[in-house]
Each structure stands twice: as structure tokens, then as C-alpha cells.
Image (spheres, helix red, strand yellow):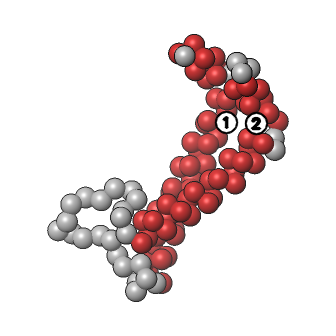
């Protein structure tokens, strides 16, 4: 099993896909955290009340609030089409899938 993972990660196309995916995820999270969340909290305070409480415990990235769930769903909707496009409609995806299907 370890050798299969090693062979997959040694492939240049697979490594490039995972690096691109990491960069896109960082851009999406940054956009949601610093652009979308402040916009929603300032424009729609009755729908998205502020989740921050100075006396409460620290919150994770996806708070159990409306704005947290909204960011989670919006992030998935932004990342999903990108992954589908890169995997199934580009040469990079074809090369990567060939490595995964080699053992089957």
C-alpha cells in the first residue's frame, strides 16, 4: 500500500495537481474569510449575526453559525467545479488519472 502511494506521489502530474489544489484552496479560504464574511456581516446583520463573542471560547474557521455554514457551502461550490475541470477536462488530469488506474 505504501509503495502505491509513493508511486502516485512521485508522478509529476499528481504532485502538480495537489500543489495547484492547495493554492486554490488557500485563495478560496482567504477570499471567504476576508471578503465574503465581512460583507455578509455588515450588509445582512439580521440574517448573519456576528459570531464573535469576546468572552466566549475561541472559534474554529467554520463556526457553527449561519455565516460559517454559508462559507463552507460556498467554498465547496467554488472548489468542486475547479477540481472537476482539472481532473476530467485537461491533459494534467488525464496524466494523473492514468497513474491512479495503472494498478486496476
Alpha carbon separation for disc pair 1 and 2: 8 Å
The reply to whether residue 13 is visible in this rendering is no
Q: Position of residue 7 (x, y in %)?
A: 63, 17
The reply to whether residue 44 is visible in this rendering is yes
Residue 58 lies in what quarter of the image? bottom left
Q: Name the residue under label 1.
A: 17
Task: Pick whichever of labels 1 and 2 is earlier in the sequence.
Answer: 1
- Look at the picture and state if 69 lies above or below 21: below
Could you tell me which secondary element the residue under label 2 belongs to? helix
The residue under the point 60% across, 17% down is 4
- The reply to whether dot 1 and dot 2 touch (C-beta < 8 Å) is yes
Within 10 angstroms of label 1, few (less than 14), some, or many (20 or more) residues?
some
Residue 47 lies in what quarter of the image? bottom left
Q: Where is residue 15 in the image (x, y as percent from the top left)?
A: 64, 29
The disc placed on residue 47 is: none
Could you tell me which secondary element the residue under label 1 belongs to? helix
- Look at the picture and state if 89 lies above or below 12: below
- Look at the picture and state if 19 lies above or below 99: below
The residue under the point 56% across, 49% down is 25
Give the quarter of the figure containing the N terminus.
top right
The residue under the point 68% across, 47% down is 83
Whether residue 80 sits left or right of residue 102 in the image: it is left
Q: Mark 2 points at which residue?
A: 93
Q: Where is residue 26 in the image (x, y as percent from the top left)?
A: 53, 49
The residue under the point 53% across, 62% down is 73
Give the quarter of the figure containing the C terminus.
top right
Amino acid at each position: 500500500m505504501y509503495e502505491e502511494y509513493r508511486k502516485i506521489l512521485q508522478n509529476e502530474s499528481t504532485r502538480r495537481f495537489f500543489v495547484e489544489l492547495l493554492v486554490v484552496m488557500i485563495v478560496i479560504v482567504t477570499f471567504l474569510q476576508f471578503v465574503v464574511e465581512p460583507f455578509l456581516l455588515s450588509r445582512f446583520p439580521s440574517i448573519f449575526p456576528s459570531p464573535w463573542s469576546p468572552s466566549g471560547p475561541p472559534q474554529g474557521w467554520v463556526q457553527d453559525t449561519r455565516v460559517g455554514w454559508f462559507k463552507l457551502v460556498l467554498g465547496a461550490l467554488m472548489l468542486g467545479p475547479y477540481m472537476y475541470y482539472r481532473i476530467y477536462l485537461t491533459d494534467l488530469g488525464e496524466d494523473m488519472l492514468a497513474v491512479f488506474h495503472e494498478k486496476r
